[in-house]
Image (cartoon, helix red, strand yellow):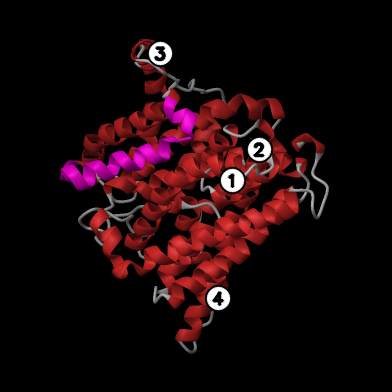
Amino acid sequence: MTDPPAVADADRPPARAWIGEDWLAVLAGSLLMALVLAGARPPAPSFDWATTADLTRSVLGAANLSRTLAVGLPVAVFTGVAAFLRGGTLAGFAFGFPAVFLLGWLAQALEGHALAASWGLEYVIFALALGLFVSNALGVPGWLRDAAQSELYIKIGLVLLGARILFGDLLQAGSLGMVQAVLVVTVVWFVTFRLARALGVDDELGTMMATAVSICGVSAAIAACGAIQGDRRKLSYVTSLVLIVAAPMMVVMPQVIRAFEIPEIVGGAWLGGTLDTSASVVAAGELISGPARDAGVIVKLSQNVLIGVAAFLLTIWWTLRERGATPGRRPSAGIIWERFPKFVLGFMAASLVFSFLLDARVVTGTAGPLGALRTTWFAMAFVSIGLETRLAELVGRGSGRPALAFLGGQAFNVAWTLVLAYLIFGGILVEVPTFLG
């Protein structure tokens, strides 16, 4: 695959590329999971604090900084080698990586403050804000650009996320979460894509936006971009929109649930179908109740499972679409395989292994270390997205039509998902499982 979007030279191909970025992500994620399963389990750092004294004693304490270093070193080594193998320079990466890592760490520390926790604000919002501040207020220095590897970071994180998507959790709720997920994804995708077309947005950008709105935000957008071999600058635009819109939703939706006295389970399912990350669903659900949180997680996990299915279907559709535009070109299995985003295979394989091949105690024991590694990569990915984004271009692109299409699709998603949540999790069509009640 080509380079991820960069601030100044988005289209510049790597000087040398020994292995594709997707396979690098699969390899890095797989090796890390193997090491953790073998016993290398760095303890997760703590970021909870409320006062300056808490910050100094806990977050900035020697023990916690040691845990941060234990997580940061393997992240630095694996991403440094991956960046080198995909065509970057170790010197350039090593110079900029500490800054990106530090900004990602700061985002997690901001999330850990009691006030941020009370509002359900998570690290992805702070990471994007920090990256945007550097990019738009200070300017991104050249020495930092080689370390702003947003796609590589998030692809490795997604492979590790597969270890969190356990089929047993999904089966516990029967088919409710999957039914809602399928209805949300299919209907919202179609409506958002058609709206984008009606507003004159090109199909490539419209596909990425529709996939991001309907499934799970940034992760789905990256999978869609890989499936259609899309423009990385358009991907950067979509991911920035996703995160900017997500921030007020995380704060407002729990308040709406309370103000209108929406049933807890319905509210949780609504959160799970509209918020774009599992962490945001958990945080927002916690503001309502435990059952609301559980319902939201079930729906979000069901949507996450559909990433692989969506990537496969998009690959076939886009290949057939190009064949129609180029008479005589056949959509062979080889072309479909070439287009398919390979990191999705790592995500699916990890999910299957942790769901069916490992003992439950092993899965539980590795959840903390893998979660800390995954969060670190995601935090750096969202910092990098901010570093790659110019707000002036975000607002002015296409005279604002793409942004309007995205907002329209998200508004429909919010309304449609609430209707489905009432029908499915409100006990109107089926009986809700007792463990959610």
Residue 211 shows in the view: no
In the image, is 423 to the left or to the right of 120? Answer: right
User: Relative to residue 257, is residue 428 depicted above or below?
Assistant: below
User: Relative to residue 367, is residue 127 depicted above or below?
Assistant: below
Tag 4: residue type?
Answer: Ser
Residue displayed at 50% across by 37% down:
31
| Mark sitting earlier along the chain (2/4) | 2
Residue displayed at 53% across by 47% down:
275
The answer to whether marks 1 and 2 mark residues whose Cβ atoms lie closer than 8 Å is yes
| Location of mark 2 (residue) | 292
Q: CA distance from mark 1 to mark 2?
A: 9 Å
Where disc 1 sits, the SS reads helix
Q: CA distance from mark 1 to mark 4?
A: 40 Å
Tag 2: residue type?
Answer: Ala
| Mark sitting earlier along the chain (3/1) | 3
* For discs 2 and 3, the disc positioned in front in the rendered view: 2
| Location of mark 3 (residue) | 58
Q: CA distance from mark 4 to mark 3?
A: 57 Å
Which quarter of the rendering shows the C terminus? top right
Q: Main secondary structure of the magenta part?
A: helix
* For discs 3 and 1, the disc positioned in front in the rendered view: 1
Counting other residues with Cα less than 10 Å from the Cα at mark 4, is it few (<14), some (14-19), or many (20 or more)?
few
Where disc 2 sits, the SS reads helix
**Residue reaching furthest to the bottom:** 327
| Mark sitting earlier along the chain (4/3) | 3
Q: Please state the extent of the stretch shown in magenta in the rendering.
A: 115-143
Where disc 3 sits, the SS reads helix
Tag 1: residue type?
Answer: Leu
Question: Mark number for residue 271?
Answer: 1
| Mark sitting earlier along the chain (1/2) | 1
| Location of mark 4 (residue) | 332
In the image, is 61 to the left or to the right of 186? Answer: left
